[in-house]
Amino acid sequence: MDLRPVALGTSVTTYDPSRPTPAAIVSGEVAAHDAPHPLSVFDMFRIGIGPSSSHTVGPMRAGLAFTTELTTLKPPSHITIDLFGSLGATGRGHSTDRAVLLGLAGYDPETVDIETVESILPALASSGMLTLPSGTQVPLNIAEDVRFVPRTVLPYHVNALTITASDEDGATILERTYYSVGGGFVMIQTNDDPQNPEVSSLATSQAGVGIDVPAPHPFASGAQLLAACDASGLSIADLVRTNEEAVRPHETVNAYLDRIADTMFDCVDAGTSAAGILPGGLDVPRRARALASKLAERLTGTHVSTDEAGASSGASPADGVHSPGARAWVSTVADPMRAMDWVNLFALAVNEENAAGHRVVTAPTNGAAGVIPAVLGYLVTHCPETGSTPGVAAGPATEDGAVTPLAHIRMTADSSEDCSDDPTSPEACAARRRALVHDFLLAATAIGALIKTNASIAGAEVGCQGEVGSASAMAAAGLAQALGGTPQQVENAAEIAMEHSLGLTCDPVAGLVQVPCIERNAIAAVKAINAARMALWGDGRHTVSLDVVIETMRQTGNDMLSKYKETSEGGLAVNVVEC
């Protein structure tokens, strides 16, 4: 489908009160230059469960919307779920069936506890009954009532699902078709013609807040963003904050930024604390816990052994456990590239949690959820601007063998804005760190909003260039901003990262967000750091603009064969033996 990019140089139009929620902007129903307000940090970063924003979070929200509407109608005797297109092709590997059922049971992806996530399918298999929020129990046979239909692609979007509730006579009580358009956003069809669908955006707890208020500094392209910064004298982060605070109180914005950052850090620590095999049948082992132990050993000189459960015990090198001598310098204080290993660790940890179906931040998608936390982890553990000491790399916590390397860094613990007059005090350092983390996320929001509205972040539409490539661009911009970059340097950093992600295909083996997805996040995180550093050495002038590279990504995605767009019918998905 045509994603309706904004024409370069097109002016932002005035507010139209008929404009719907952010999902309509993401889906292309509303062109970027027609939106009264750019996408918000509340739209770009959303908390949910893995392994996919489009295949898990979106369908779960659709199920919740359906069951909410159903509460006002006659209790059903039967419910069926049809998953079309990409949802049908890779829905099993992405746990789409489980996600819809969780939604129908009344759970929200932002708040559902992981024990419930992991227990619903076994409970359904044993009881054969789905309990709706009203208390009504509906017979449900997962094998027969959840139907995967990959060869049927509905015209509006490749990620479509239809949920049908019927009575004891087979008469339809309620039937709805939803489209998961990426990033957890959902559109609902409002007519009965599948060939000529009319849709509206599905509101969530955050969507629509402030979307009807014109932004003080509207922008729909990179050129407009830079022009707005020049006109206002604001940095990109400050400009985005001004737009945010036009519709929400300062404290609300800060609290959400704190929550997003802390959820990312929580996810890193959860991933480095866990061991075992990832679900899905590929028997992919978790690597983050073992890598954390090795990195802690190299940095401290104390060996930490781990068992399969992730338990650890300390030992000194004198106990006879030594790393190969030829690589004994790697990731020690003497290694000038040691930060890269920690960045890899942070990304692997998050994406292993995502693959396990645990809580992550959609940034901008679940499949790319590890990139921004990894670069943010680099910022708070290795950059002097946030309190790290050059040459020491004292940032990651290694006392416990790096089981929780970011446990000592939480924004909620740093949230006091009344700091000591001593700039070297822990309070002042924490306040600076918090401010820079906020700037990182705000600048990343601007870049993500441009990519979402002028191209796509959905692997099913444009391949992984729209997921991991977008995350890399957002992370590069965020880091460049936090390290003091000008608006032009921040835009350049995003452009470099996005330009060198063009053509990246989405070809998950067995439809699981594991191979190559987990490692791909780590590579993209390192790329983002490099892009930011390259941009910061320049003055912001460059040949290829961010607008051009976003449009190129959109065109590349449109030209890409469908087998490379989250269908698992091409690339690594067909060339890797699964058993």
Image (cartoon, helix red, strand yellow):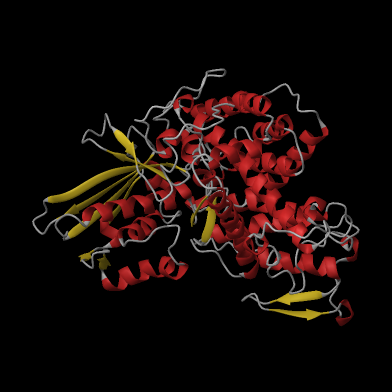
Nearer to us in this view, 418 or 186:
418
Q: Is residue 532 above or below residue 274?
A: above
Image quarter (top left, top right, bottom left or bottom right) of the N terminus: top left
Percent coordinates x, y for residue 542 in the rendering:
74, 24
- In-front residue for pair 262/145: 262
Q: On screen, 551 above or below 75?
A: above
Extreme left residue here?
169
Q: Residue 212 versus residue 19: which sits nearer the camera?
A: 212
Kindly tell me whether residue 323 is visible in this rendering: no
What percent of the width, then of the height, locates residue 370?
61, 52
- Closer to the camera in the image, 27 or 459: 27
Residue at 41%, 42% in the rendered image: 208
Please say whether residue 9 is visible from this viewpoint.
yes
Work out whether 121 lies above or below 246.
Answer: below
Residue 495 on image: x %, y %: 67, 31
Find residue 387 and report its horizontal and vertical position in percent.
80, 57
> What residue sits 57% from the left and 17% below the top?
9
Count of numbered circles in the view: 0
